[in-house]
Image (tube, rainbow, N blue to C red):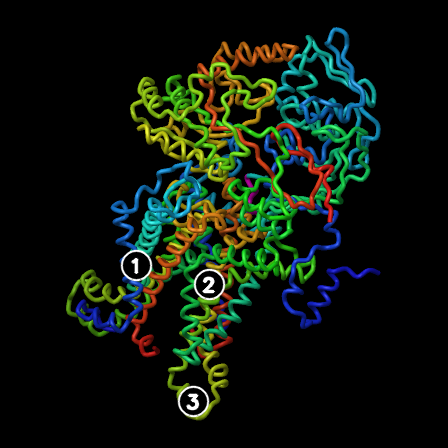
């Protein structure tokens, strides 16, 4: 696998509709979420006299059990879900990258670090999050930490295997023999090779983080109930399935679509970066 | 030998018969279903009735323990375990004689000594009990079936105190001799139901079997009083945490009763021909905002008055109990009590929902934008919703309210903190109460550090409250109630959010459920299943 | 081979030590004093000091860790804060429903997932393959509790085929036991079926493109023999690996599924423990599930050598 050039991207993307579909959808969702204040209205304003209203011109998806605008909450909910997903993925990727590179490069650390990673991997995410939150109380920060910890080992393992493969390559050995300093070799030759694996794994982590947030909020230990997140909205609205279906369908469908977009992107990237997978198609 | 359905299913599965899947798998009622009632209740974690004020613990007490007196549907105490009772001329000596046929589930008879020990244990915790003990010279047994209470000075409400407040369970002396701080774990009483230890699954389900040896009174059942006749073999309490699942189980006939169906789904229940709603605890409860009198800004009466003007009860009822058929606004500190509810000193704030007036009063109180912490109980929907609406209403008038989400048990721990916000203290929490009398209602105390969380202090009010135990006629008590309320609304000991009764839902095949006064649960005798 | 097994077992012990240290530190380093949490809401300063003393919280951290770890090895997981009962007893009473649900889910997911994956790989790009792509996209993206409510609504309330909720112990009859577990198992399995099917498909495709498979095909081996005799045997390793790994995810799903279907298992125990801040229960379930995960993966690793003797470490 050679290095990826920017100029290759459009051509590769044409051959990989999944990347376009997933990435495009995700980009659209991110833009919608970021520009929410421009068009979506107030997600926290309550009107107890307008509870569980059907969709109308002023409230496109109707209102929830506290008389809040379901459309605004759904749009603002995207911010929470995407933030939890992306930040969890980013933290797992950064920490995993660091650990993976060190483990891949230093034989002496490898054994110890990888045992630690095996250990963390064995802790179920939801249980770890429940344990952390039962100590600290609900919050977005702690949620991200709790999701990122068990996901880090998978990233570290992947990066380590890539590093192990790359460092035997002639051009890396040549660079090292030629007197290049180790950090420079890591930066120039080894790090870029880990990016594809990181992106694919990052997408997986992101998707599972979004679902985990929803699951924890469903159990009442996710983000605080005041904050509009899709998990919170589904958890509260499950009672109203028969009387105000949009209160649960809107966040539910957005959740599924977002996770789908991230998964498609991940699958697309995997095909794109893995020539063997391409051959199979 | 009879072949049970279970044998058939086993045989069917073992033989791998080619029956169509639905008919094999369909959830069919088992033969004993007609005599077994399944009820979705909340989780029972405290079994000793004097160790918790939770309704579920009280109902556990109703089932397995009998008691001396019980309230009828008109809130009048009637003898239950007591056959005859008598008070001396000087009103200082009470004599109680137990009726015949009272036995514990282990077969031993109920004695006067058990009653004395049970009263002493209960009185360590209950407010009315404490009052009795403060006045009592002696409580002792006279013979196996008779005991006496001798007082230093008369106490008009003695018998009322035995039925109001915490449930008074009569238990074996060896259980009742334990300190009140140590929970009783044996679950053996003399009540109409027997707790089935073998089938107890904490967190999941508890089973109560009919006590066939129980001898009921002759009178018709009336409220909690009268004959306690159990008409089923057993009652199973199921703990289904998910309300949606609980209602689905009721619709499918997997359970017969749901304690607290969500108000928004009443129309769904009412449109189902097999289900109906019924209010069993007629008293209902009043939700209120409690402010911390020790910390700014609510140490200032103006800030508390601001809350009275701010809160629009109809709006809060909308997010707490959204069905107006079961709610009402309330301005009297005696809520909807038929005896004591009044309108003294309520005209000035009556409607509430006046944010401008509230903003102005907050300013007069010297409020300068400090953070106000509202404890939000996330596992109690009505309280959680009301907390959110309160925070939103405060923010609209420029008060920087902040929600601290936590479970009710965490809230119960945190509200005991008298310190400042920086030291983990609090400003506001929301709770509910059901008025019995100003002696037992913790909410209605205003004796500073001795008072309930929030610690309101007003000596004039307390002086009036102390008289309650000694006024004898209803008219005098009603006059006292007006005076107390007059002072209460001047210092604003708390602010009401509204009053609601909670209907239960059950399958129509379950009949004979007793409607009782008060708000703290209902008995399970008299009900039966018709098919 | 014996040396390999020994090495794997030793490294498993090392991993468990890591898990133990991590979970121990989680309790000690997170904000909130465990003694205050354990003492409960009506605790006085003396009670808290007494609990600190009794739990040995005044001793140096390493000493505390050794005490704690020895306790767990001896089967002492401490007492529940809320009920005061031994945690191990509470957990063991909740094991049966959770194990039943997990095993049924594994059986369903592996059997359906693997066959699905094989079919999709066999006719890559065909109808089954496309259906799998759509199915797995859905299975991955819809939360298990949403699937659960849908199943209850349709199969229990509308059709009356299956019970809405609850659990009947296996000694209450195999029929009722199974009937109550059908919907939870299906709800929980959809995601795993998708997962296992995709991994199976990918592994099978990889093996099918190997030279020796082409040789076998050229020699006229039947497609049945190709798929099951040659390919599946070689694709078995990655499939087994993901089944081992997915156990950790399964536990998360079990917590949610037990809540939706009101199954009194470990998941409900944990969820109820959250509201009471019953930390010993959460901590014990955490270490037990991690231990189980590590054990399962050890078994899977050892099973490699049996399935595919070519692997030597």
* Quarter containing the C terminus of chain C: bottom left
**Horizontal side of residue C132 vs B252, given as left or right:** left
Element at label 2 = helix
Q: Are marks 3 and 2 in contact (CB under 8 Å)?
A: no
For the residues labelled 1 and 3, the Cα–Cα distance comes to 43 Å
For the residues labelled 1 and 2, the Cα–Cα distance comes to 22 Å
Label disc, if present, on residue A26 of the rendered structure: 1
Q: Earlier in the sequence, mark 3 or mark 2?
A: 2
Q: Are marks 1 and 3 in contact (CB under 8 Å)?
A: no
| Residue closer to the observer: B355 or B419 | B355
Q: Determine crowd level at label 3: few under 14, some 14-19, many 20+ residues with C-alpha closer than 10 A.
A: some
Q: Chain of mark 1?
A: A
Element at label 3 = helix
Q: Determine crowd level at label 2: few under 14, some 14-19, many 20+ residues with C-alpha closer than 10 A.
A: many
Give, as a single range, the part of the protein colored magenta. C75-81
Are dots 3 and 2 on a single chain? yes
Are dots 1 and 3 on a single chain? no
Q: Which residue is mark 2?
A: C191
Of the two numbered discs 3 and 2 in the rendering, the one whose residue sits closer to the viewer? 2
Please identify the residue farthest to the bottom as the structure is shown.
C219
Q: Determine crowd level at label 1: few under 14, some 14-19, many 20+ residues with C-alpha closer than 10 A.
A: many
Where is residue A75 drawn, in percent x and y?
A: 33, 49
């Amino acid at each position: 696998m050679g290095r990826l050039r920017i100029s290759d991207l459009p051509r590769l993307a044409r051959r990989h509709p999944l990347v376009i579909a997933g990435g495009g959808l995700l980009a659209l969702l991110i833009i919608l979420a970021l520009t929410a204040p421009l068009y979506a209205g107030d997600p926290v304003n309550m009107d107890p006299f307008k509870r569980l209203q059907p969709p109308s011109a002023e409230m496109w998806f109707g209102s929830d059990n506290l008389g809040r605008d379901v459309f605004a909450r759904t749009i603002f909910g995207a911010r929470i879900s995407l933030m939890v997903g992306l930040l969890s993925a980013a933290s797992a990727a950064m920490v995993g990258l660091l650990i993976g590179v060190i483990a891949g490069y230093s034989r002496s650390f490898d054994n110890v670090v990888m045992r630690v990673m095996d250990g963390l991997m064995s802790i179920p995410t939801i249980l770890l999050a429940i344990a952390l939150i039962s100590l600290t109380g609900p919050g977005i920060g702690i949620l991200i930490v709790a999701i990122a910890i068990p996901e880090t080992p998978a990233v570290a393992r992947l990066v380590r295997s890539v590093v192990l493969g790359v460092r035997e390559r002639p051009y890396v050995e040549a660079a090292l023999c030629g007197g290049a300093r180790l950090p420079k070799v890591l930066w120039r030759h080894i790090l870029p090779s880990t990016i594809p694996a990181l992106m694919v794994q990052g997408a997986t982590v992101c998707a599972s983080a979004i679902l985990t947030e929803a699951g924890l909020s469903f159990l009442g230990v996710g983000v605080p109930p005041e904050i509009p997140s899709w998990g919170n909205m589904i958890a509260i609205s499950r009672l109203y399935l028969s009387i105000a279906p949009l209160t649960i369908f809107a966040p539910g469908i957005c959740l599924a679509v977002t996770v789908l977009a991230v998964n498609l992107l991940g699958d697309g990237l995997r095909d794109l970066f893995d020539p063997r997978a391409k051959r199979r198609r | 030998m009879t072949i049970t359905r279970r044998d058939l299913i086993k045989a069917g599965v073992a033989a791998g018969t080619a029956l169509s899947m639905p008919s094999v798998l369909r959830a069919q009622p088992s033969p004993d279903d007609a005599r077994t009632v399944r009820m979705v209740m909340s989780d029972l974690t405290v079994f000793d009735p004097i160790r918790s004020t939770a309704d579920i613990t009280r109902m556990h007490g109703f089932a397995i323990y009998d008691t001396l007196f019980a309230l009828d549907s008109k809130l009048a105490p009637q003898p239950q375990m007591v056959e005859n009772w008598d008070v001396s001329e000087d009103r200082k000596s009470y004599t109680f004689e137990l009726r015949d046929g009272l036995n514990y589930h282990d077969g031993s008879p109920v004695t006067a000594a058990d009653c004395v020990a049970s009263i002493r244990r209960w009185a360590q915790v209950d407010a009315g009990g404490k009052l009795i003990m403060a006045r009592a010279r002696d409580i002792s047994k006279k013979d196996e079936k008779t005991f006496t209470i001798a007082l230093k000075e008369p106490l008009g409400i003695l018998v009322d105190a035995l039925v109001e407040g915490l449930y008074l369970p009569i238990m074996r002396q060896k259980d009742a001799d334990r300190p009140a701080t140590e929970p009783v774990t044996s679950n053996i009483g003399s009540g109409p139901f027997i707790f089935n230890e073998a089938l107890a699954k904490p967190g999941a389900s508890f089973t109560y079997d009919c006590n066939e040896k129980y001898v009921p009174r002759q009178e018709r059942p009336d409220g909690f009083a009268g004959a306690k006749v159990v008409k089923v073999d057993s009652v199973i309490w199921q703990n289904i945490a998910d309300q949606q699942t609980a209602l689905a189980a009721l619709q499918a006939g997997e359970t017969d009763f749901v304690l607290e169906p969500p108000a928004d789904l009443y129309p769904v229940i009412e449109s189902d021909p097999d289900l109906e709603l019924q209010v069993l605890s007629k008293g209902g409860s009043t939700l209120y905002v409690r402010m911390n009198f020790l910390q700014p800004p609510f140490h200032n009466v103006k800030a508390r008055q601001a809350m009275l003007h701010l809160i629009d009860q109809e709006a809060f009822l909308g997010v707490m109990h959204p069905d107006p058929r079961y709610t009402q606004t309330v301005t009297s500190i005696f809520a909807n009590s038929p005896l004591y509810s009044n309108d003294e000193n309520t005209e000035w704030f009556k409607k509430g929902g006046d944010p401008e007036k509230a903003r102005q009063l907050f300013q007069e109180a010297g409020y300068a934008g400090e953070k106000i912490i509202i404890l939000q109980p996330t596992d109690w929907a009505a309280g959680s919703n009301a907390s959110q609406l309160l925070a939103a209403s405060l923010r609209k008038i420029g008060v920087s309210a902040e929600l601290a989400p936590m479970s009710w048990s965490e809230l119960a721990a945190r509200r005991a903190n008298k310190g400042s916000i920086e030291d983990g203290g609090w400003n506001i929490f929301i709770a509910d109460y059901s008025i019995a009398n100003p002696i037992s209602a913790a909410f209605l105390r205003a004796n500073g550090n001795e008072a309930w969380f929030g610690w309101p202090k007003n000596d004039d009010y307390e002086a009036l409250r102390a008289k309650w135990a000694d006024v004898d006629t209803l008219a005098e008590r009603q006059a006292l109630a007006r005076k107390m309320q007059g002072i209460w609304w001047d210092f604003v000991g708390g602010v009401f959010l509204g009053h609601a009764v909670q209907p239960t839902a059950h399958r129509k095949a379950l009949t004979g459920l007793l409607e009782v006064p008060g708000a703290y649960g209902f008995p399970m005798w008299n009900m039966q299943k018709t098919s | 081979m014996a040396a390999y097994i020994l090495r794997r077992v030793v490294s498993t012990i090392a991993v468990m030590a890591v898990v133990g240290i991590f979970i121990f530190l989680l309790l000690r380093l997170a904000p909130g004093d465990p003694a205050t949490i354990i003492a409960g809401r009506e605790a006085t300063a003396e009670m808290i000091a007494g609990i600190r003393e009794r739990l040995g919280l005044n001793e140096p951290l390493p000493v505390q860790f050794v005490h704690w770890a020895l306790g767990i090895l001896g089967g002492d997981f401490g007492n529940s804060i809320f009920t005061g009962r031994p945690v191990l007893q509470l957990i063991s009473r909740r094991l049966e429903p959770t194990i039943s649900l997990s095993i049924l889910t594994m059986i369903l997911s592996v059997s359906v997932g693997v066959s699905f994956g094989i079919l999709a790989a066999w006719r890559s790009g065909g109808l089954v393959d496309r259906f799998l792509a759509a199915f797995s996209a859905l299975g991955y993206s819809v939360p298990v509790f949403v699937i659960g409510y849908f199943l209850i609504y349709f199969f229990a309330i509308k059709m009356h085929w299956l019970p809405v909720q609850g659990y009947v112990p296996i000694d209450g009859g195999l029929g009722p036991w199974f009937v109550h577990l059908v919907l939870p198992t299906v709800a929980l399995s959809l995601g795993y079926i998708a997962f296992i099917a995709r991994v199976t498909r990918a592994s099978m495709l990889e093996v099918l493109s190997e030279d020796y498979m082409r040789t076998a095909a050229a020699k006229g081996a039947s497609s049945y023999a190709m798929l099951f005799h040659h390919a599946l045997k070689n694709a078995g390793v990655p499939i087994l690996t993901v089944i081992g790994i997915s156990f950790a995810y399964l536990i998360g799903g079990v917590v949610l599924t037990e809540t939706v279907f009101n199954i009194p298992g470990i998941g409900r125990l944990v969820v109820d423990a959250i509201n009471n801040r019953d930390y010993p229960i959460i901590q014990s379930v955490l270490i037990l599930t991690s231990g189980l995960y590590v054990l399962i993966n050890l078994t899977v690793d050892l099973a490699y050598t049996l399935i595919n003797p070519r692997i030597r470490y």
